[in-house]
Image (cartoon, rainbow, N blue to C red):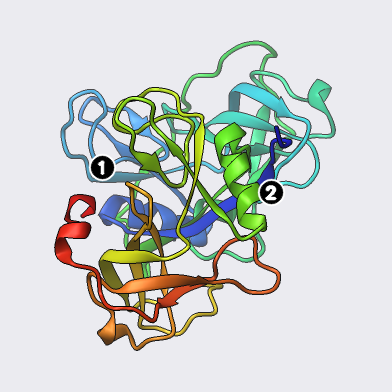
Amino acid sequence: MPENLTAPLVVAFPFTRSLGPVQSAFLTGLRERTVLGVRTRDGRVLVPPVEYDPVTAEEIRDLVEVGTTGTVTTWAWNPAPRHHQPLRTPFAWALVRLDGADTALLHALDAPDARAVRTGMRVRIRWAAHREGAITDIACFEPHDATATPGVTATATPGATPHSGAFADPVTTLTTPARLDYTYAPGRAQTRYLHALAGRRILGERCPSCRKVCVPPRGACPTCGVATAEQVEVGPRGTVTTFCVVNIKAKGLDIDVPYVYAHIALDGADLALHARIGGIPYDEVRMGMRVEPVWTDDSRHPDHYRPAPEPDAAYDTYKELL
């Protein structure tokens, strides 16, 4: 049994959304060092503001300005900051009720150590040197000279004043970088598959019930749900069953557009895998075209598939794999 493999993987992409009038005013206000909340019909001030009352679901637009100082209502110490977190040194995640607000805002609190943080302590906003209309315009909170009684949960302080929400050059969209770091462990079936690919062989596994050969193998039949163990070498050639033309260039991918991604039924396999088609103009790729893998010198898997020197497959030979 080959040793199981692991690999560090990162999934990262920018998520962009448009902003309504409330969120637009809130983020533009942060850029201008102004914190806005929204007042509900029963008089509560919500910070950060929302567009609909979380209790009644009523639309709310009554913007108010609150203070830049506040009180810690609860907190947790973060001893090992991670990638893209607000501070590089250990800090506290804190819920801070700003003066004039009835709800708390979650952000980083810069403190020398956990012993310097307590519920009820007074804090103030430390603004970022460069502000662009995002929650990161608040660099963090920091301890404030005025103190509250330790261990006592603060109540909202009067002082929220009406605000029109009007600013020059308002922020209308928000782009947030999403990132997930994790370690992938392929398991026994995929480990065997990957070791075979390193030797330029493609292995599937046969279901003991329906007898279908699954590629890539997952250790269980996707149709029957039973465990699979019998290994079957398939391909290397196969048949294009369906395909799509890609017209948008992916960041970091050195492939000119347009190009074709296809489902390919390898000879001897009962499930199609997907791969890029190369060596042929994109508009000449077709269903039933016979293809073969192209390996690069340092690749652990085929770089792409190209047309094989043989006639197209008859539709009846791959129709069940569409």
Labelled disc at residue 169: none
CB atoms at circles 1 and 2 under 8 Å apart?
no
In the displayed structure, would residue 302 be above or below residue 99? Answer: below
Identify the residue at horizontal 80%, vertical 42% (top origin): 89
Please name the residue shown 56% across and 30% down the image.
96
- Residue 171 seen anywhere in this rendered image of the structure: no
Specify the quadrant of the image occupied by residue 64.
top left
- Decide: is 301 above or below 206: below
Q: Is residue 45 left or right of residue 198?
A: left
Distance CA(mark 1)–CA(mark 2) = 31 Å
Circle 2 packing at 10 Å, graded few (<14), some (14-19), many (20+), is few
What amino acid does circle 2 point to?
His
Quarter of the figure with the N terminus: top right
Q: Is residue 227 visible?
A: yes
Check disc 1 and give the amino acid type: Glu
Choose the circle earlier in sequence order: 1 or 2: 1
Quickly name the residue at label 1.
51
Snapshot quadrant of residue 222? top left
Q: Which residue is mark 2?
A: 83
